[in-house]
Image: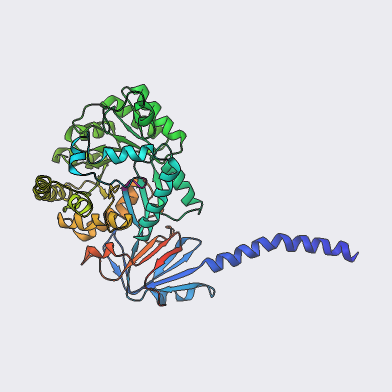
Amino acid sequence: MQRKAFIPFAVLFLTLLPAARLAAQSAAAATLVKAGKLLDPRTGNVMSPAALLIEDGKIKEVGSPSQLQAHIPASAKTIDLGGATLLPGLIDAHTHLLLDVVVPPTAESARRYNGDFAPDLMLAVVESPSKRVLLGAQMAREDLDSGFTTVRNLGHAGIDGDTALRDAIDAGRVSGPRILASGRKITSLGNYLQSLNPALAEAILRQEFFEVANLEEGRRAVDENLFYNVDVIKVALDDDGVGISTPIMSAMVEEAHRAHKKVAAHAAGKGAIQIAIDAGVDSIEHGNEVTDEQLKTMRDKGIFLDITPTFWSGFFSAITEPSIVRLPVSRADQVASDERRHARVANFIQRILKSGVKFAAGSDMCWFYPGKTRGQASATMFSHLHEAGMPALDIIRAVTVNAAQMLGWQDRVGAVEPGKLADLIAVSGDPIADIGELEHVRFVMKDGHLVKNDFATP
């Protein structure tokens, strides 16, 4: 009788034990983060002092420390950042984590089509896919360490390198930002590489691209990327507007939208931009030669412009001069090119701000920058945008709330609000007064998990 009476009790105990453990874990998962200031990018308002209650990886409550005091579980862990300024985790809306391009010397570059980029792309393509993904894992960790808690990887990752890296990060096997992966770029033949060995060309190109020439091939390219579970479709249009036509582009957009995937179009020239607009893409990447009329149409259609200020402010000189031989005439040409570009991009930024078009920003980083980690190199885009005339608050919006909306993840990231994922960064000073603060992020949290805290006392 005693044994029979014990059995139901034991069953009840074992049934409740997992729930008890879960409750204990939930309580232990609570974290209070306090800081001198909290910047809301959407409004520009600053809360001071500020506190956030985080539970199960999400923001539960935001307010002053005194407001939250009564709601803090006794077991909550407290992180006190002193007088630091808190912001949402940064979003790099356009990057290439599985490339680390070293620009070749001038003489070598001059021998090749697309000579600054294509030689190292070829080296990457012929590398072991495993080696390439492990390089991507390093780049991802360095991006996260610089405050980029979400990134959109838009191509140049082999067949499925970026989706594999995304899944490994999501599973907690490696550390890195949340990734939206695009798989292989869809492009026209000869857009990036030309005149390859005909015995090898198709095999090489298929590692990196889908080349399409008609509607059927375009739809098939989208479907094959979907087979590898991509998050977004990336199409590279020729700058002169030839290659992929409007009907082909429209067919790919239709196929992607049927699968509830957004389409990002590399489009720098006017012709390419018009094809992308007419096809109804979700974002135009680069958009360097966009006209005022095209900006107006993009605004009316709700198409995002993803600004990529990679080569602004003398970036190319910065990555080449420390490590490679550049002929004197090439160096002089580069200086002159930098000066011309500065005038163009200043006008570009002013027209964008005036147009009312929705915009985000991405580093387009795939370059080896001597003396900088990948995250530090990606963060140079903030000063580039500011030097071109974009106000600091607009820059911060471009890599938080705006970028989140462009990605379709505005319900998850981009703001410090209840219900959002607990993706946070903190800097020492005021990023509105000095946007350079974002190049020196000292605190990073992703999903409520501490990544780094340079404010912590030893």
Residue 347 is covered by the magenta coloring = no
Residue 3 vs residue 384: left or right?
right
Q: Residue 182 or 395: which is nearer the viewer?
A: 182
The N terminus - image quarter: bottom right
Residue 123 percent across, percent down from the top left: 34, 39
First to last magenta residue range? 94-98
Residue sitting at x 44%, y 58%: 419
Residue 97 is covered by the magenta coloring = yes
Q: Is residue 282 visible?
A: no
Q: Residue 335 or 104: which is nearer the viewer?
A: 104
Residue 5 percent across, percent down from the top left: 85, 64
Residue that protrudes farthest toward the right in the picture: 1
Residue 13 vs residue 417: left or right?
right
Vertical position of residue 195 compared to residue 345: above or below: above
Residue sitting at x 21%, y 41%: 287
Q: Is residue 97 visible?
A: yes
Residue 314 percent across, percent down from the top left: 16, 52
